[in-house]
Structure formats: structure tokens, C-alpha cells
Amino acid sequence: MNEFNLETYKKRIFKTISKYKLVEPKDKIFIGLSGGKDSGCALFFISQYLKTYKVDAEIFAFHIKLGDFIPEKVIETVKKQTEICEIELKIYDIKNYGIDYEKISKLTRPLCSSCGTIKRYLMNKISREEGATKLCTGHHGDDFIVFFMKNIIGKNIDWITKFTPYLEGKGKQLTRIRPLFFGSGEENKNFLNSIGFPYISEDICPHSLLKQKFDKRREKWYRVINQISEWQPNFKIYFLEGIIEIAKNLKEQKEPFECEVCGEPTNKRICGFCKLIKTQKDAQ
Ligand code: AMP
Ligand code: ZN
């Protein structure tokens, strides 16, 4: 296992931010915070980068509260994270967008996928409506390597165009930035532990039995890429650079349609979020 070095990690993330022009003067960047280590790390690095290079851009952090089951500790943690970075925090509740998490959790469709649909939809809608120029998330390199492999297996080749540190917005879809593209979950954890930055380390999902199954599979994927990294130096970095090259060479993605019900971007006639709302209503 490679020795973790705080400064080397920071340099790698700063290099991603500058090389891919993730932040530019006049930007209004919205960072989605879950309370966990990855989004906490993204917030820390982006805010440090702006301060270090005196970039004249604004950052706002936001947290989407999925339901009343979310422990107060999560809200306190995102508050602390933003206070340390001196960034304004906005909190949104999914109840105000017609979603009843309790009902969604009882539907037959897989809950983790519904939860992902809700978060992706609201992160884009909220940030865009608040005037953001870019949406920043804590997705990291391990996520992208695993997404890539799964999309190859599923033959969803078009999706691979989305796996880059900077993803240009199209139509109502905001530009997305991933400062931790060349980072990993383990390094984010080591970094935050070394500087004593707060984050929630335990699982806050109330459906943990169901989620455990999902997480166990994900852990297996992560374990495999970590095993390769042990004998193949710089495996992850080279693999991620390869993904960026493939993404560049794939055909340009078409502009998304606008959902016939809500007008938000989608690649279908009706977006996943509106379908979920309808299923929730039909189940009543
Ligand atoms: P996940 O899908 O949970 O792996 O989260 C991916 C990214 O979405 C995180 O790194 C955060 O930047 C963002 N995110 C996750 N959950 C929330 C939330 N409840 N509110 C705002 N942003 C979130
Ligand atoms: Zn819709």
C-alpha cells in the first residue's frame, strides 16, 4: 500500500482543478454536501483553491434532506463543514418537491436507484434555479472506474462521455465538475482525518439491510481495483486518463429533451423523477 502524503494529494487535486478549468472567474459554484467524506473533501479543496489562487468566483454549499429520518448529526456536520470553509449553506427538503420518502421506500422498485434519481434530479434543478454556473459533487476516481466497467458490461457506451472531471452542460443540464476525479475514497478519508475535518463516517440510510446488499457488491468492485493498484503502479491514474480519452473520442451527446411533465432535462419523454412521483401517487 502506498504511503499517504497530504501535500501530494492536495497537489493532485489542485492540478485537476486547474488543468480542466473546473473553476473560473465569475463562476457561481454549487456543491452538494451529503455530510460524508467525499463531498466534504470536494468542498474543502474547491474553497482552498479559490483562496490560494484568489479566483473571483462564488461557492455555495447545499444539502438535500431526504426525510425526517436524517439524524440531526448530519445537518450539524454539513453546518460545521461549511463554517470551517466559510461557505454559505442552503438546506432543501424533498418534501417540498412532492416526494414522500416513506412511500417511496415501500414501492417495489429498488430504493437505492429511486434515491439516486431523486438526488440527481434535485441537485441539477435546485442549483440551476439558484443561478449556479456549475454543479460540483464529491464523485471520485474509484467511482468512475467502477461506473466505466459497469457501463461497458451493460453496453451503455454513450454514458462513458459523462466520465470526465468537467462535463459541459447542455440545455437545462448544468455543467458538472468533479475535482476528486483523480482521487479516491480512501485518500479522501486519510486527508480529512489528517486535518481533523468533520464528516459522517457511519451509514445513515434507514434501510440498511437493503442497502448493505447494494454496498457489498460495490465494495467488491472497489476491492478489485485496489488489488490491481497494489501491483500495477499508477493503475488508477492511467485508467482514468484512458477513460477521459475514450470520452473525448466518443460522439458528442445530443442535447437532452425536456420532460413533458416538469420541463427538466431527460433522455426520455418523461423524466425518472416524474415517473417516480406518478408511481408514488398510484400506490396510494
Ligand atoms: P452518492 O450518490 O450518495 O454517492 O452522492 C454523490 C454526490 O452527490 C456526493 O458526492 C455529493 O456531492 C452529492 N450528494 C449526495 N447526497 C446529497 C445530499 N443529500 N444533498 C446534497 N448533495 C448530495
Ligand atoms: Zn419530469
Image (cartoon, helix red, strand yellow):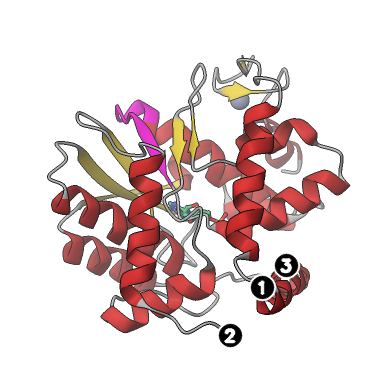
Q: Earlier in the sequence, mark 1 or mark 3?
A: 3
- The residue carrying pointer 1 sits among few (fewer than 14), some (14 to 19) or many (20 or more) residues within 10 Å by Cα, namely some
Dot 3 corresponds to which residue?
Answer: 218
Residue lying at the far front in this picture: please name it. Answer: 233
Give the label on residue 1, or none.
Answer: 2
Q: Reply yes or no: does residue 115 show up in magenta.
A: no
Q: Nearer the viewer, mark 3 or mark 2?
A: 2
**Label 1 amino acid?**
Ser
Depicted 172 relative to depicted 76: above or below: above
Q: Position of residue 8 (x, y in %)?
A: 36, 69
Q: Residue 215's spot in the image, x, y percent? A: 70, 70
Which residue bears the numbered disc 1?
Answer: 229
CA separation, marks 1 and 2?
9 Å
> In the image, is 100 to the left or to the right of 229?
left
Front residue of 231 and 26: 231
Magenta span: 128-136
Q: Is residue 172 above or below residue 141?
A: above
